[in-house]
Amino acid sequence: MIQPFTKWLFPLLFLFAISLSFGQQRKSYEGPLKVGPYKGKANYQYTIIDLDTVYDGDFLLQKSNLETLMQNEDATFRFAGYFDKGIANGPWEFQFGEFQTSSQSRVVDNEYRVMVSGVQETGEGNLVNGKPDGEWTYTINQIKDSEIEKILFKSHFTFDSGVPQQNFQIENDSSVLVGRFLRDGLAHDEWSYYGTETVEDIENWFFDDGLLRTVQVKSDRVSKEISIFDKNAPQYKTIQLDDRFLSLLTAVMEDNVHKSHIAGLLAQNLGYYQKINSVLTHLDSKGFANDTQVKVPFYPLDSTQIQTLEQIVADYKVAAEIGNSILKNSHLNIVKRTDQEAYFFYNVAEKINKDFLGPLGKLVGYQNDDVLQFQDISTVMQRLWPNGKPPKDIKVKSNEAGDIRTFSLPSSEEFGYDGNDLLSVAAMGTYAKMSLEYIKGSLSSRLTNEEQLQILNGIEEELIAINDNLEQHVDSISHLPNGYVAALEQLQKLADSSLTMYADIKNPQEKLAYGNEAKLCLSQLDSLAQTIKGIPAQKEHIKKEYTDAVWNPFMANVMAEEVKKRIVGAYENVLIPYFLNVATEELTCGNVGQLNEQIVDTHQKLLELRYKDTKKLERKLRREKRPIEVLKLLNQHSNTKNQ
Amino acid sequence: MSMRNNSSSLLVVVLLTFGLFGTLKAQESEPEVLPETSQYKDPKTKVWFNTYGNIRIGKRFFWDAQTHFRFEETKNTPFMGQIGQIYNRHAIGYIISKKTNVSLGGVVRINFNTDEESEDRNMVPEWRIWHQYQFAMPFYSAMLYHRIRIEHRWTQGFAEDSEYIFRNRWRYMFRAKIPLNDTKLQPKTFYVSPEAELIMQSGKEVVASPMEDLRLTTTIGYIATPRLTFAAGVMYSQGQERYNGGYYQQNWTLRFHVYFSPDFRRVKNKLPDIHLTD
């Protein structure tokens, strides 16, 4: 009986001791953890190596908040996997979700269940030494009432230590991209993109040993082949198929209006891999990437070229800033209406911005994206300036009539930028920058000091906006009687004259002060215009208010009876003509507000007087025809108590 | 003309002679003999000045106040004549709906003796109790009205010892008011109003003359305001003499009317003026 037991006891004790010794090294943690932007509840194992905490073993970080879900929507995440001495290893799952709930819950198996709708992203696969290995999928599901409604995106790759193998597939809800790789991860052969509903390909990329030779696009059954890279380049370089490659492709395909669907899907997928990579990087495990390789032509830039490019970028930056400050200056926008010099320079700046800075901006973009080294400079030139570079003599309209005037820098003789190299582009950039600086100098008297300018700018923007409003009000008056038209036209005249007055003032201090007054005046004029336009409707309103429906016993019908005719009469025959007359004959910025108030008040008073005892007032109104006195009488009586 | 006059006067004599016995049995006073054919008297001319007041005293009640001055020709003053009756009719009305109202009230009429040669009293009062029911109907742009008026009437003659006699009057009037210069009856509108009223009477004293009066009138009116209307028109009327149903009196009457309907209620009481059923 004892014999077999002792036979097994030793090995068992031995195994127990081993597991104990490992167990002592690995510790567990359960509690809050912040990984980059992700803050949640963690549950992981770790060891301490050289006093550093190193993830080792199971790892779980997740967040979901029922409270925020019930309130509005909840952004959730869940990262689960395994670390081997700090390096992510083994199966991993990354989830990102955004959910709303309809707030309907039910109890199932003693659990509260809440239906959610939203989007759930899941990336899952195996990692070896931090690199994807084996099958990886990234799926985005649209969830409705806790069930998958639609697959918005799904990519499927197979990796060997980060290098993609064999085939891949990326699909969204309406189309699929399939392609293949060589064993070393180079893109190869045909990558096809087709709609799931149609059999026909929409876009094909043809790789030859990693080199993208042609892109074939089909739209409306018309197939078009675009040559991308040829085999005549002196050198080729293998780079990652990443955002930089896609930028390069955009640059090369620039002439085509067509936007590549394949590039779009690839960029989308790259983004998701980057999302996972950023989580792992924050967990100190590097190397998660989709290491697809492509070959591209390579034109290494020499140090002179790099220097020249740096100068172009610097000049462009200065020029673009000046150009912007001129073109977006609202003060200048006002001044150029009356000032021909300003008008001319403004137009020159506009033309430089378009003809010089536009293409230069693209070149600077290539440089910033670091894709210039993969393109032939002369081809780039041809693409950016297909009709040659813009001339130094810049011809623009010098006035509204359309007379042409030419601008050139006084030192334009010194600039020559006809060549087809970077140096000539740099010269052109410098010319553009100096021209804009010159223009800025010429306009400086009009662009006084920055701070005042900005205040004035603000006021001027408002002045123009209010005046536009007023013009709109005054424009649509053809249906009104003559008296009204004359009054409204007078309002516009007053507005115009105060704007002219403003434009004439040179001293910034005075200009600012007057500008503020003019702003008040214009907005009051705007209100008054609205009020005056409203008088006919108000008149109708008053008339209706002062009409009783009276049952006539002799006719046995209901008749409209005008009541308090003296009051309505005074309003229609004395006050309204008076208001219009003041607006037409006596209007100044000083009394606009008062007049507006009077009109609005009077209307209000008439409404108030309707149900008051007004016998005394009516008696007095019989004799009184002077508008001011009538206004006084209305004022006195509208304050009496209601009967 | 003269031939016909002679023959008719002959007829009267014959009828009177025949009728003497018959009426003697029925009546102790002078017997009455019906003429063989109806006898139309020469038309008289009259002029009436009528005021109609309709004074609102509540949401549904009004005071109906009418005063008429009626002149009729006499031997000495033709056409316009002298004052015949002053007529005061009052009632309290109740508005059932915009189109229906009823009234109940009394009348005091002062009858003047227009017979200049009469030795009797110059003036006697007449008393009535009356009630009426009015219905209005819109008809295109016009309005149609039906009026049923029932009067209980006490009258007496001008003779010194004359006693009151009691009669009932049954009146139905049909009237239209057609706007002339507008699409409906409203202020500043002229209208024409044809009207026909049949007045029947009954009572112990009414033996053979139930049709007291048939009045055919046309007036032209002007609605000055919802509360004031003027109208003027001509009325032809005919009816049986009470003493002898064979004789018909005829009248041509010029009528002048003022209709007024003031409302002295305070403003706040007046507000739901037409919303009677709210």
Image (cartoon, helix red, strand yellow):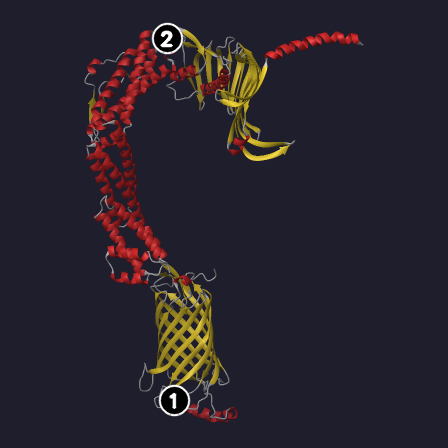
From mark 1 to mark 2, how far is it between C-alphas? Answer: 143 Å
What label sits on residue A552 in the rendered view?
none
A552 horizontally vs A114: left or right? left
Q: Residue at x 20, y 19 (%)?
A: A409
Q: Quadrant of the N terminus of chain A?
A: top right
- Label 2 lies in what chain? A
Q: Quadrant of the C terminus of chain A?
A: bottom left
Indicate the amino acid at tag 1: Arg
Q: Residue B187: x and y, percent?
A: 35, 63
Residue A130 visible in the current orientation:
no
What label sits on residue B121 in the rendered view?
1
Q: Residue A577: x and y, percent?
A: 25, 53
Mark 1 crowd level (few <14, some 14–19, many ≥20, 10 Å Cα): few
Indicate the amino acid at tag 2: Tyr
Q: Is residue A580 above or below residue A420?
A: below
Determine if marks 1 and 2 fall on one subunit: no
Q: Quadrant of residue B92?
A: bottom left
Residue A326 visible in the current orientation:
yes
The residue carrying mark 2 is A299
Q: Viewer-proximal residue, B89 or A252?
A: B89
